[in-house]
Image: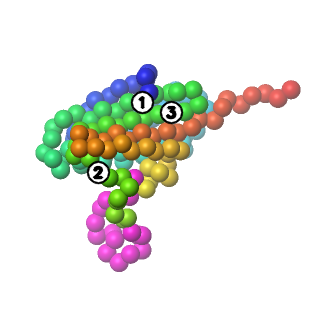
């Protein structure tokens, strides 16, 4: 992604509403993207940003989190980058179903599965120096009039 909006925020939950607003406003620039898809993208980015904030909090880090947003022809791409300790995205503990006894007694575990449902593509690159989550939502081509 080489063009678009770059937003750097402190790793504090108070900035989530700013991230949501910027993502929704930028996504609405594409007139073909419906309100539901904008809401899906906003929630997916919010989940990725929340995970980044938690990653920094676990380390006691006050480094900034970077969110990059770009309109790339047929797609909207958003990257959320933290400088946390990283994790193995292939080795996550499943959250378990909501119907599981005691499941509602703790939060967490639904962020990545939710992102996979809400975005058309998700890519996670994670290493000791941080994690980058890339979310892609495809936009419908403009309606073309038929002859």
Q: Is residue 108 magenta?
A: yes
Mark 3 → mark 2, Cα distance in angstroms: 25 Å
What is the residue that sits farthest to the bottom in this orientation? 101
Q: Residue at x 30, y 62 (%)?
A: 107
Judge from the rendering whether residue 2 lies leftward or rightward of residue 141; answer left or right: left
Judge from the rendering whether residue 33 lies leftward or rightward of residue 47; answer left or right: right
Asked which secondary structure carries label 3, the reply is strand
User: Dot 2 corresponds to which residue?
Assistant: 87
Mark 1 → mark 2, Cα distance in angstroms: 23 Å
Q: Residue at x 36, y 65 (%)?
A: 95
The segment highlighted magenta reads 96-112
Q: Are marks 1 and 3 in contact (CB under 8 Å)?
A: yes
Judge from the rendering whether residue 27 lies leftward or rightward of residue 52; answer left or right: right
Give residue 141's position: percent from left, percent from top.
66, 32
Closer to the N terminus: mark 1 or mark 2?
A: 1
Closer to the N terminus: mark 3 or mark 2?
A: 3
Closer to the N terminus: mark 1 or mark 3?
A: 1
User: Dot 1 corresponds to which residue?
Assistant: 69
Asked which secondary structure carries label 1, the reply is strand
Give the crowd class for mark 1: few <14, some 14-19, many >=20 residues within 10 Å: many
| Residue 33 seen | no
| Residue 116 seen | yes
Q: Are marks 3 and 2 in contact (CB under 8 Å)?
A: no
User: Dot 3 corresponds to which residue?
Assistant: 76
From what the image shows, is residue 125 above or below residue 76? below
Of the pair 139 and 124, the residue shown nearer to us:
124
Mark 1 → mark 3, Cα distance in angstroms: 7 Å
Picture quadrant of residue 125? top left
Q: Is residue 67 magenta?
A: no
Of the pair 128 and 115, the residue shown nearer to us:
128
């Amino acid at each position: 992604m080489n063009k678009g909006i770059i937003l750097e925020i402190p790793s504090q939950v108070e900035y989530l509403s700013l991230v949501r607003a910027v993502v929704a406003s930028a996504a609405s620039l594409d007139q073909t993207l419906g309100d539901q898809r904008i809401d899906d993208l906003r929630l997916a980015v919010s989940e990725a940003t929340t995970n980044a904030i938690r990653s920094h909090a676990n380390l006691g880090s006050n480094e900034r989190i970077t969110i990059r947003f770009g309109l790339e022809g047929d797609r909207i791409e958003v990257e959320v980058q933290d400088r946390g300790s990283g994790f193995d995205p292939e080795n996550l503990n499943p959250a378990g179903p909501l119907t599981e006894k005691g499941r509602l007694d703790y939060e967490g575990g639904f962020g990545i599965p939710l992102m996979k449902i809400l975005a058309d593509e998700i890519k996670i690159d994670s290493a000791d120096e941080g994690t980058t989550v890339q979310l892609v939502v495809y936009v419908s081509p403009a309606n073309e009039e038929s002859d």
